[in-house]
Image (cartoon, rainbow, N blue to C red):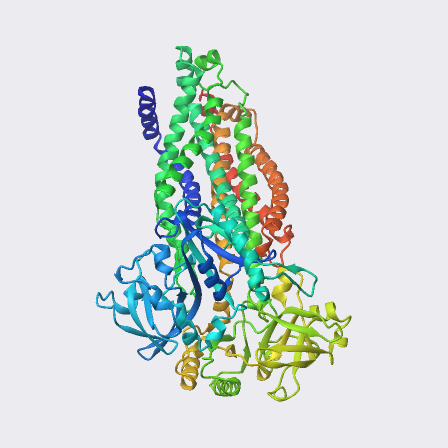
Amino acid sequence: METLINDLRYAMRMVTRSKGLTIVAVLSLAVGIGANTAIFSIVNSVLFRPRPVAAPEQLVELYTGHKEHPYEATSYPSYLDFCERNEVFSGLAAYSIMQLKLTGNDQVEKVWAETVSGNYFQVLGVQPVLGRPFVDDDDRTPGTSPVIVVSHSFWQSRFNSDPQVIGKTITLNNQTLTIIGVAPRQYTGMLRGLAIDVWVPTMMRPALEGENFDRLTSRGNRNFFLVGRLKPNTTIDQARARFDRLTLEMREAHPEEWRPKREESGTIREHFVTILPESQTRIPPDAYTAAYALIGLLMVVVDLIMLIAGINLASLLLARAVARRREIAVRLALGASRFRIIRQLVTESVLLAMMAGVAGVVLTLWLLDLLVKFIPPLPEGVHLALDLSIDWKVLCFVVAFSTVTGVLFGLAPALQTTKLDLITVLKNESGVFAGRYLKSRLRTALVVSQIACSFLLLIGAGLVLRSLENVRPTRLGFESTNVLVAPLELDERQYDRTKSQEFYRQITERVEALPGVEGVSLVDAVPGGVLGESRRGVTIEGSGEHLQISASIVGPNFFTSMKVPFVAGRDFDERDREGAPCVAIVNEAFTRRYFSRDAQALGKHLTKFEYRRPDQLCEIVGVIHDNKLQALQREPVPLFAFAVQQFYKTQMTMLINAPNPKSLTLAVRKTIQSLEPQMPVADIQTIEESFSVSNYPYRVLGAVIGGCGGLALLLASIGIYGVVTYAVAQRTREVGIRMALGAHKKDILKLVVGQGMIPVAYGLTAGLVLAVVLMRVLTSSIVEFDLLLGISTTDAVTFLSVTALLLTVALFACYIPARRATKLDPLESLRYE
């Protein structure tokens, strides 16, 4: 311990003596450590931090599913059966997430709610900070307990933290509910990342949704997730074994829900129960592969930055070692062991890394704050709930990461530094003779590694940014920035089929009459493409096979107004109204799969299935080009569309074409509320803003990789500059002799720059090979993200641009010290030694 303290004291003196080197080294490492810590903080918040409940290690979640989709929800009757036959849980609760409309103060807002069983808070061990939680009596009979528990943030924002809030009422979906409790600040619901605003008993769900109670008791209505708390001394394996037996019992008691079913494709769907511990449900289990792939990609990116920063540290330590050669030679000559000196040098590098770790924590706080500010405006009522605070896990990560960094990148320079010819160094401190240049293979290897890593990061940034550019509306082939998107949500209890059709007709006419409006169209969803991604069941004429195919419901002239080209046929128009023959429009992929040619699809029929309506034959009257967004992501899939005039739909999206759509926002809001005062209107935005939300993951990924690529370029240029400067300093006498013998300045310039660019060329070659290999591996491993949209992993424009950029920066980094070498005075340089 005494030796370690002495090493630290000596390391502190050396660090404070070389202030310039210390500052550069600490700042370089702080960038890498800060980036890694920021990513770890996010991972820690999402995956490693347990839910803020009592004894989370005792909690499990139950899913009812089948082989293809094992993590699905459960019907409410099955939940009641589980509770009745439960032998392994001290409590089993049900919850379901829904969005409600909050009315009051002449405003309509959206809030997120969990409808929960009466024992929900008891099972989780969450105690409200005010009032009481739900009890079983609050959830026994439909509609008899209009009570509610509000979140801490809801209490603060809507009631200004009023301590007398218990007993007050709020109106959700036209139902008056009495507040009985306020949840603690740290508890925001079961779905990580989404802040729940309110909790209501399950038995109030039919009243809130305007449904018949029979839908809640239907075994085909699977919309509840289950959370249970294991009994003391009961293991999760015992719980799984019990529910395996219970599944067999359920197949006998309720064969319509649990017995294996053979689908049209021939697949046998057999339902079973999956039980997972709380630690495996912090994100949806079916999203684990995609989440880990994204995390792995981000870690690769920031670790490359760390590698480049570490290489800079190693280069700086090697440069300083030149000035300390005589010191180290004297210590070795006096009997110091090589291991003792290596330990001293590594201690110095670890100290530098620890100082960088402190700076890295400060940088992490700034990066996380920047990430939060970078989030685009979220849809109304959506609030993020991620605790990105620095806890003991993050601090332990910083300490461990900094220590490993200091050892890894300090060991090689220490080993190199202690390889000395003592007699030569003690006779001649510089270690060079006339005309002799001490080449360092280690320094060359470090530069090659820096260039290769920088090339990888810049290639990744270029591919993602070019991919992001492809998903702008202007690149997808329909009316681009001159569109205003206005969601329309009607209450099913007030709008039947006839009233909803009349509302869509009136709102279309009124908005079309506004000054500056060039056209209005309707579609059920615009998630980032022309058609939505919802799936509907249809039967295709001639096949008799019932299929689930992506579909949309659109208004008259939708495709024409959005400039989606037709291959054959026509758009929907006023002829396609309620009572007229049912019609449909399909895309090219649909005709390729189910008909041999586009023309053959016209006149064919689809069978439309609609809730509580007889089946209808719908004639195909048009064929449109494939959705370009899908063409960018993958092979286009079959799509079809029905006319909204012939469909009962209470949620649609109005698209308004105008030269200046943003200026129409207020007028459109007033027009909607003049027809339906209870409709939320806060989510009206331009189509560009709509795309910015759906493309947020791409934007974040592009910003992260792009920022890391820029940092890599800066760090690599510093490394090249340092190597060439070091080489010029080592060759001062050689340069003087060349100039004294008549060498021109341009010859010296070409010599220095040429030799400086040799490791750059090696690095570019290595980076090119690695980029081609790694990009293919990464994109294939995270295919769920469709990471590169319409861009090849070997995109020529990106590779040529990055190569040109790196060569330009490297030439500039070599030119500065080379130009300084041409200004040497031969007499002074020969007197140098």
Residue found at x 24% / y 68%: 165
Q: Horizontal placement of 63 versus 336: left or right?
A: right
Position of residue 428 measured from the top left corner of the image (x, y, whole percent): 45, 15
Position of residue 103 measured from the top left corner of the image (x, y, whole percent): 35, 77
Position of residue 411 measured from the top left corner of the image (x, y, whole percent): 46, 26
Q: Quadrant of residue 391?
A: top left
Nearer-the-camera pick, 422 or 599: 599
Visible residue check, residue 681: no
Visible residue check, residue 502: yes
Q: Horizontal placement of 166 versus 259: left or right?
A: left
Residue found at x 52% / y 29%: 443
As drawn, 620 above or below 381:
below
Q: Quadrant of the C terminus?
A: top left
Residue found at x 74% / y 70%: 594
Position of residue 491 measured from the top left corner of the image (x, y, whole percent): 45, 80
Q: Horizontal placement of 669 versus 502: left or right?
A: left
Q: How many marks?
A: 0
Q: Quadrant of the N terminus?
A: top left
Nearer-the-camera pick, 39 or 182: 182
Residue found at x 23% / y 67%: 162
